[in-house]
Image (cartoon, grey):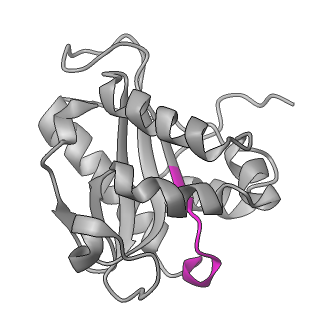
Amino acid sequence: MKNNDNIVILGQKVNLIPYLVEHVPPYHEWMKSPLLQELTASELLTLEEEYEMQKSWHMDENKLTFIVLSPTYLKNRVGRSACFGGMIGDVNLFFSSPPPTPPFPSLPELEIMIAEESLHRTGAGLEACTHMMQYAITELGVVGFRAKIGNTNIKSLRMFALKFGFVEESRSE
């Protein structure tokens, strides 16, 4: 989504920046992990396909993506974003129709991935989701969110339920 082209959201544990071409190689390396593929319900793409995906996400008005950076993480510091920290994951919103046309026909789907395992259970995912929701509410007029989480992703299930108050509406296999 072009809406966040020039947006940087600074936090205490994480900073959010738009998903840029320079982020594709580290992102592609993460997504080679079978565990991350399972937890995110993703398929392995070639590097070329990953570049195409980044470009399509940037142009698609139904997708809002930020790369999650940690100011204290020394790896994965790339390009213009290096001064904001090292890449540790991404946070996304998926809309069924483009904003800003409140009220939205359906709630956008919120998705978080903290790919760097050393930063799991540090509050990085919680803060990234909080910043994304605040941005969507204040800048896009979003009034609520939903999340689709795999049954085996216990960490995310707990975070969304205990920290954000999400309740299970349905379950699919």
| Residue extending furthest toward the front | 48
Q: Give the vertical position of 3 relative to 70 (above or below).
A: above
Q: Which residue is drawn at 33% across and 73% down?
A: 14
Q: Which residue is drawn at 20% across and 13% down?
A: 101
Q: Give the vertical position of 15 relative to 105 (above or below).
A: below
Percent across and percent down for residue 35 are 79, 60
Instruction: Tell me the magenta residue range.
Output: 112-121
Quarter of the image where one finds residue 46: top right
Q: Give the vertical position of 74 relative to 9 (above or below).
A: below
Percent across and percent down for residue 42 are 70, 41
Residue 27 shown left or right of residue 96 in the figure: right
Residue 146 shown left or right of residue 168 in the figure: left
Q: Residue at x 51, y 59 (%)?
A: 25
Q: Give the vertical position of 94 relative to 149 (above or below).
A: above
- Name the quadrant of the C terminus: top right
Q: Which residue is drawn at 36% across and 49% down?
A: 21
| Residue extending furthest toward the right | 173
Quarter of the image where one finds residue 144: top left
The residue lying toward the viewer, choosing from 95 and 105, is 95
User: Per the image, is 5 magenta?
Assistant: no
Percent across and percent down for residue 142 are 26, 30
Percent across and percent down for residue 71 are 31, 83
Mark count:
0
- Name the quadrant of the N terminus: top left
